[in-house]
Amino acid sequence: MNVLQIILVLLISFLAGMESVLDEWQFHQPILACTLIGLACGQPAMGIALGGSLQLIALGWMNIGAAMAPDAALCSTASAVLVCMKGVPVSEGIATALLFAVAGLTLTIFARSLTIGLAHAADAAADKNNIRGVEMAHIGALMIQGLRCAIPVALVIAIPADAVTAGLNAIPTWVSGGLSAAGGFIVVVGYAMVINMMATPKLWPFFILGFALAPLTGITLIGMGMIGIFLALVYLQLSPEFNGGGSGPALEGGTGGDALDDILNDYE
């Protein structure tokens, strides 16, 4: 590896860390981050193979309410360094990536805790009409997010691949198990927060139907999504609230857009 490759890899990692909160260009997604690092290291095929495999795993990773998903940015960049720069097989890179995702989740929580002070600084600057101060607080928060990904990647570059893998595997089972259990509790709380915001009598039937269909293993996530879209479209077509056919001023003059519906409503 040469100096230019290291600089490019660190820059990609820095951008991926910022994109984990920006979501502007999606550089933190495995298919992009691994491919870019593969190009920087002269191993585009290895980067695409790793990124494609990790992307399928990360499709279900999303922040819901207070629940934070595993860190896709560090997962992608650090594993891509091992595969594309240090020659680790793609299969081992995928297994190691999951460990990096858990470690990145801890670093994300730490980085977001640091940005609390910057949020207060931005509030103080806004009270003084200091727009530049608000901008610098936001930029500082993004820098922290970028560094929390770039610094671990720099360590992965500096430390031999065997030592990195051994260190990650040396994490005690009670630590990883405790993090998994805590993550499960946080997910439940996150779902409860989302449900609390969107819970209405009109949506509860769909919520119950989703729970009833979820245990059916023959239905994939794509199938569940298609069923949800179908039910939403049917609901919009049948609900007078959305198509203007059941009540309101449109019916008083018979201009609901549906002649049969106007006749039936006039008859009523």
Image (tube, rainbow, N blue to C red):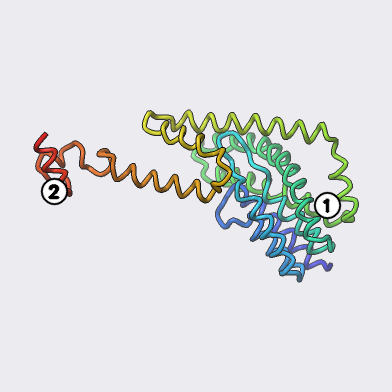
- In this rendering, position of residue 47 left or right of residue 136: right
Report the residue at 72% width, 34% height from top. 180
Secondary element type, mark 1: helix
The percent position of residue 240, horizontal first and vertical second, equals: 25, 39
Question: Which is more toward the observer, 177 or 261?
Answer: 261
Name the mark nearer the viewer: 1 or 2: 2
User: How many numbered tags mark residues here?
Assistant: 2
Secondary element type, mark 2: helix
Kindly identify which numbered label has been placed on residue 259. Answer: 2
Given the current orientation, which residue lies at the most extreme bottom position? Answer: 42
- In this rendering, position of residue 161 left or right of residue 246: right
Which comes before the other along the chain, label 1 or label 2? Answer: 1
Report the residue at 52% width, 51% height from top. 222
Question: Which is more toward the observer, 57 or 17?
Answer: 57
Q: CA distance from mark 1 to mark 2?
A: 70 Å
Kindly identify which numbered label has been placed on residue 121. Answer: none
- In this rendering, position of residue 227 left or right of residue 116: left
Kindly indicate the quadrant of the structure image that contains residue 5: bottom right
- In this rendering, position of residue 207 left or right of residue 216: left
Location of the C terminus (image quadrant): top left
Q: Residues within 10 Å of mark 1 (few under 14, many from 20)?
A: few
The percent position of residue 192, horizontal first and vertical second, equals: 54, 29
Question: Which is more toward the observer, 135 or 28?
Answer: 28
Q: Are marks 1 and 2 in contact (CB under 8 Å)?
A: no
Instruction: Name the amino acid, label 2.
Output: Ala
The percent position of residue 149, horizontal first and vertical second, equals: 72, 50
Q: Residues within 10 Å of mark 2 (few under 14, many from 20)?
A: few
> In the rendered image, which residue does mark 1 sit on?
155
The percent position of residue 67, horizontal first and vertical second, equals: 61, 35
Location of the N terminus (image quadrant): bottom right
Report the residue at 9% width, 42% height from top. 253
Instruction: Name the amino acid, label 1.
Output: Leu
